[in-house]
Structure formats: structure tokens, C-alpha cells
Image: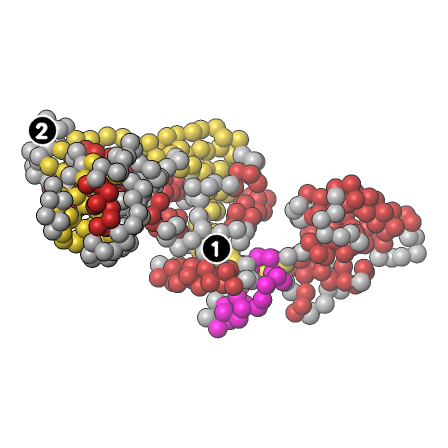
Amino acid sequence: MKIAVTSTGKTVDSQVDPRFGRAAYFIIVDTETMDFSAIENNNVAAAGGAGISSAKAVIDAGAGTVLTGNCGPNAQRTLGAAGVKLYTGVTGTVSEAVQLFKSNKLAEAAGPNVQSHFGAGN
Amino acid sequence: MKIAIASGKGGTGKTTIATNLAYIADGSGRKVQYLDCDVEEPNGHIFLKPKIKKTRAVTVDAPEVDLKKCTGCGKCGEICQYSAIVHLADNNVLTFEQLCHSCGGCLRVCPADAIKPKPLNIGDIESGTAGDIEFVQGRLRLGSIRTVSLIKEVKKHIKRDSLAIIDVPPGTSCPVVEAVKGADFVLLVTEPTPFGLNDLKLTVGLVRALHLPFAVVINRYGIGNEDAEKYCKAESVEIALKLPDDRRIARKILSIEEGASKEALKKAYRRAAFRYHPDHNPNDSDADKKFVLVNCAYELLAEDKPCEKLLEEIKSWPNFPEDDKYKLDNLWGHFLWWREKFFD
């Protein structure tokens, strides 16, 4: 199964990026093989709609689950519409986050945990 | 004639200038309109106290998708630059109407005619009168990003035979461009501080790019530094007006400290009025002038606004010097000079 983790860098040793829409990278990890690839996020400096575009990118990459720090309402709605499971409040490195997820130690988010534009830095 | 009152920095006194300009122009007998284009936070009504006679809701088009007709081609999502419509898979299409800019792109590219426009309320236009001034203001709906669209609607109320005073939102972004567009003249209000100057430079760049004639008003003149003036000189930008930060002058006349209570102010006024009253100073030929200055100072401190009528009277007094120091502007320069002559 493929999961997407927001990341500050290109590898599984990078820290989880606390922002979803404006995360630096999305690391797509295959939980069986632990193979991964990094997608650079083009929406880091988007004026608006970053969460939606990022959700679209993650969905198009085939991920069925997202692990991140914070996620706003628009991104949550988009992910939900595509049936992608969302886990917020995740910290540590990407590989640590994946291990926690695999051992069922993360709780699925019931909804967005921040407002729109939370990660826009303004 | 359309005059736009703009400023880069917020809180420099745009609305103070705009509403006073409308008020004074109205007194000159011409037809005056005041249009508050600061639709995210219209506040001209606080000063002009208009009677609102009409409120009209403004709507724009947002997409509505008929998923039964959708073929899942994804073209709508591709053309949208604002993520207001997003195609996920098959006929799974989401819309985020609050992000839509009503470009109509998705409607046009849909091969199945599955997208129809639906009205989205972005705010209200309230119109009425403040005395003889025709008053119009836009009030953007909370959460709406369609500032520019609403400003456009406000400006549609401009009449050709009127002097239209346009209160522009602060900043230099799209709403400002929309509000100043088509103006015959732009007044840029700034304050003589580093923040004021920084944003003044940005705004000057903007009005120059739009090829609009403009001049600068330095409000609260006397605080901060002289960099704004130096900048205007270096850039050959005309300074139309300098409005001094004048409370100090008023306080000095009444011999009162900053932050004094209302009661203390009233007491000080009574004391000064008694002391300078012409009846108590029969041998002082300037007693009547001193008395006017005392009243003027009190009006300013008590009402938090200058009394234009008293200032006009002060201006009419003879023997005003040709010294640059007192040419702050016609009214306040006189006040300052007479105050120093009589009270220092």
C-alpha cells in the first residue's frame, strides 16, 4: 500500500513537514517494500488553494493514506472525496512516522485540525 | 472628476482625508459623491454618518457541476488556476466556490455541458446620503475573496457630473489597482515614519505604472523624520498638503498634560477661557484672538477633531508671516503661528 508523508526533505530520514498544502515534499512510501520516491511540491508559494492542489497531487500519485502535521478543511475535503485516509499531528522523521503507522499507533483524523491558510505564513 | 485617496500603509489617514474632502467639497456647492471602496473594512460611514436608503446584494458566477453529465475528462480542473474546481477521478469533481474568480474557463472547456453558472453572494452595496453627499459603500461578505469584483460594482455608481471621492483600500495589490483605475487624480496619504515611507514608495511605483497623476499628503507631520519629504523632493513628487500632528499645540494653550481626563480638560478649558476672555482683558487688543485659539484647542482635544470653522477664522487674521515654518498648510500654519505669538 502506498502512503504519502509530508516532508521537509527528499528522503525518509527527513523530518515530517508540519504543513500539508505547503509541505516542501511528499514522500510516497510503499509500506510493504519501504521503497520510496519524493515529489517536490509546486504549491509551497501558491497564493491560495495550495491544500487542494497538494491533495490532487497526492491522489494522482496513488497514495491511499496521508501522514502530516496539520491539514486544513479544503485539503481534507479533497482527500476525503477521493477516499484517502488522513492522519494529522504526526512528527519525527518520515521513516519513524511510517513505522508508527504500520504498528497502528496513529489515530485517523476526524476532520481538519487547522483553518485554511494555516501554513501560508501570514 | 474622480479623486482617489490611497496609501500603501494602513492607518495613515486615508478615510480622514477622504471624508473631510467630501465634506468640504460639498460645502462649496458642487455635487459630491463619496465611495468607500475599502470594502473589506469600510469605515467612512463612521465620519459621514450617512442615512442608508438602499442595500443591494452583489453576486458573481461560480460553477455548479451536473455529475450525471460529467464524462470525467478533467479539463475543468486543468484550466482552473485557483483550485476552485478539481477533478479527482472519473466523474468525481469537487468545487470550492469561495476560491472561484468567475473566469468562466471551466464552463467553456467542458465538452459535456455539465457545468452551469450559479450565483454566489459576495457582499452588499449600501447607498444613501450624508447631508448633500451621495454616499456609497461596499461591504464584502465575511470569508469572500472577491474584493475586486465588489469594488467594480461600487465604482459603477460614479456619476459623470459629480465630484467622486474614492476611498481606496490600503496596500498595493489588486483591490487598490481596481479602486484607483480611471481616477483623474490620486492623493497618496502617508505619515513621516519609516513604515509610511516604505509603503509610499511602493504606492508611487504603482500609480506611476498606471500613468495616473498624483500628489502626496503627509499626515501627522512633525512626528518621525524628514525622509518622506526628502524622498518626494528627490523623486519630484508634489506634496499637496502637510497636516501637522497638532495635539501638542492644543494642549499647550490649555496648559494640560497628555492623557488628562475629560474633567481635567474641561477644568483647564474653563480656566483658560476665563483668563483669556475679552471681557476680562479690556486692555488687550488681541484678547478676542486668544479666546478663539483657546476654543479651537479645546474643540480639538475634547471632540478629537479640529473645528474647521474656528480655523477658518484664524486664517482670516492679518499679519501672518511669510516664514516657511508656518506654511505647514494654510489653516494649521496660522494656528501654529498665533499660538506661538500669544502663548509661548
Q: In front: B246, or B327?
A: B246
Q: Residues within 10 Å of mark 1 (few under 14, many from 20)?
A: many
- On the image, the x and y values in percent for residue B241 come to 57, 60
Q: Which residues are magenta?
A: B217-234
Q: Is residue A117 magenta?
A: no
Asked if residue B209 lies left or right of residue B15, the reply is left
Q: Residue at x 39, y 55 (%)?
A: B172
Secondary structure of the residue carrying tag 2 is: loop
Q: Chain of mark 2?
A: B
Residue position marked by numbered label 1 in the rendering: B9
Quadrant placement of the C terminus of chain B:
bottom right
Q: Residue furthest top?
A: B68
Q: CA distance from mark 2 to mark 1?
A: 49 Å
| Marking on residue A50 | none
Report the number of numbered marks.
2
For image coordinates 77% across by 62% down, the residue present is B340
Q: Which of the pair A75/A18 is nearer the observer?
A: A18
- Mark 2 or 1 closer to N-term? 1
Write down the residue under mark 2: B69
